[in-house]
Amino acid sequence: MHFQDGRARVTRKMTRKMMRFAVLFTLAVLGFAQQPQKKAFLIRIQPVRPTFVNDATEEENKIMGAHFQYLKKLAAEGKVVMAGPSINGTKSFGLVVVEVDAEAEAQKILQDDPSYTAGLQKGEVLPFRIAILRGR
C-alpha cells in the first residue's frame, strides 16, 4: 500500500506540473497573439533651403547633430528601422523608416525632430510596407 501511495503522489505532482505548464503556455500564446502589429511609415525630410548641404551655419550643424542623436535614440527604442540622407546637392533629402502603433505616432516623431522644429527641414509621413529587409 505504501508503494502505491507514493506512486499516486508522484502522479498527482506530475499532473499539477503539467496543468501549470499548460496554463502558462496558453497565456503566453494568447499574449503573443493579442500584441498589436506595428505599422511602418516612411518619413521623408528635406532641407527648406536648397543650398543647406553646402552652406549650413555652425548653429544649423549643431541642430543637425541633435537630429542625428534623436534618431539614434528612437532606433534604440525600436521605433526607427533605418535612417539616412541622400546627399545630392540641391536635391538632398533624408529618409526615416519607422515601425510604430499608429500614424499619429509617426507624425509626432517628425514634429519632435529637432531639425523640423527648428525649421531647417520640412517633412511628410507616408504609409510604407517593408517588403525586404536584410536579416528579417
Image (cartoon, rainbow, N blue to C red):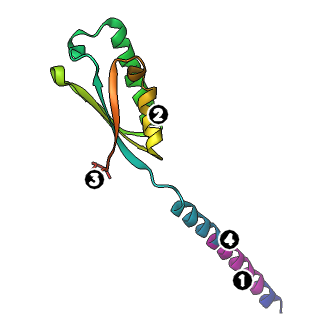
Residue under circle 4?
20
Residue shown at 43% from the left, 38% from the top = 106
Q: Position of residue 22 (x, y in %)?
A: 62, 73
The part of the chain drawn in magenta is 7-22
Label 4 close to label 1 by CB (< 8 Å): no
Q: Main secondary structure of the magenta part?
A: helix
Numbered mark located on residue 131 in the image: 3
Count neighbours of disc 2 (C-alpha within 10 A) and say few if under 14, some if 14 to 19, many if 20 or more. few
Circle nearer the N terminus (3, 4): 4
Cα–Cα span, label 3 and label 4: 40 Å
Q: How many marks?
A: 4
Q: Earlier in the sequence, mark 3 or mark 1?
A: 1
Cβ atoms at labels 2 and 4 below 8 Å apart: no
Can residue 78 be seen?
Answer: no
Q: Which of pointers 1 and 2 indicates the residue nearer the eye? A: 2
* Residue type pointed to by label 3: Ala
Report how far apart the C-alphas of labels 2 and 3 lie in the structure. 24 Å
Number of the front mark, 2 or 4: 2
**Mark 2 touching mark 3, by CB under 8 A?**
no
Left or right relative to 133: residue 40 = right
The residue pinned by badge 2 equals 108
Residue pointed to by mark 1: 11
Residue at 81% of width from left, 87% of height from top? 5
Name the residue furthest top: 58
Residue at 18% over, 25% down: 91
**Front residue of 27 and 56:** 56
